[in-house]
Structure formats: structure tokens, C-alpha cells
Image: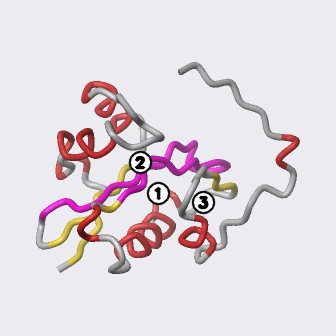
Amino acid sequence: MITVSTDKTKLDVPFIQNFLKDIYWAAGRTIEEVQICIDSSVCLGIYLDEVQIGFARVITDYVVFGYVMDVFITEEERGKGYSSILIEAMLEEPVLKNIKIWRLATSDAHYLYEKFGFKTLAHPEKMMEKILL
């Protein structure tokens, strides 16, 4: 049985950190850093028979802007539609329903987010960033 929950006490933080530490967008993130990220975000865990198989988090002000980060499904559970279930649950989450602008960055999952109405930026030349890595 698949369930999605925003209950942070159900999150398996070592599992999340173990996955993220080797992935290109979060390489080297420590368990302490993962916990800070969780504490500072709206988080969703996805569970198969009560075992966590994925994660997503949203940084938000709950009204104007939400930034989607750290979305993943374990390798062995990919291709079964679980990422779509997770994204749909995120977009339907009551505390996130008022967000007007959603953003994210992806190198390889455009097809997933396009199903939910995400598009490439209309005016990327207006966007700026500062990266301190």
C-alpha cells in the first residue's frame, strides 16, 4: 500500500541523507544539514507498506512562492508511478494550496513535472542566482 505523509516524525532521516549524499544536486550533504533542511521545509515522505521509498520538500512562504527540492524515489521503485503520486500529493497538500508561483530545477525529470503544469521559465534572463558551494 502506498501512502504519502507530511508527518516529519515518520521521515527516515538516515535513509534520506544516504540517498542525497551521492546524488548530483546534494552531494556531500551531511545528516545534520539534511535535518536542518527538513526542519525548515514542508516535507513529504512516500511509503510502500510503511517503508519510506522517496521524499520531496518545499521551501515556501505559503502564499506567493514555493521551491521544490530533493525529490527522489529509490532506484528499485522507479518506473511504477510513485513520483507522480508524490508530486500530486505535494500540489494538493492543504498548507501549500495557496502558493501562486512554483519553481524547481531539474536536469532529467522535465517529463514528470510537465504532467503537472510546470514549464521552462518564460523569462530566464530575469532570474539571478548566487551559488556558494
Residue under numbered circle 3: 98
Against 43, is 4 above or below?
A: below
Q: Residue furthest top?
A: 132
- Amino acid carrying label 3: it is Asn
Per the rendered image, the range of residues in magenta is 51-72
Q: Is residue 110 left or right of residue 49?
A: right
Specify whether 106 is left or right of 71.
Answer: right
State the CA–CA distance, disc 2 to disc 1.
9 Å
Q: Amino acid at mark 1?
A: Val
Relative to 20, 68 lies left or right: right
| Element type at mark 3 | loop
Q: Amino acid at mark 2?
A: Val
Examine the rendered structure and indicate whether residue 67 appears above or below residue 128.
Answer: below
In front of the other: 16 or 88 = 16
Residue visible at 53% across and 21% down in the picture: 133
Most frequent secondary structure within the magenta stretch: strand
Q: Is residue 128 above or below residue 57?
A: above
Checking the image for residue 95, the label placed there is: 1
Q: Quadrant of residue 85?
A: bottom left
Find residue 23 and name its label: none
Q: Residue at x 17, y 52 (%)?
A: 10
Check whether the beta carbons of the residues at disc 1 and disc 3 lie within 8 A of each other: no
In the image, residue 63 lies at what x, y percent? 62, 50
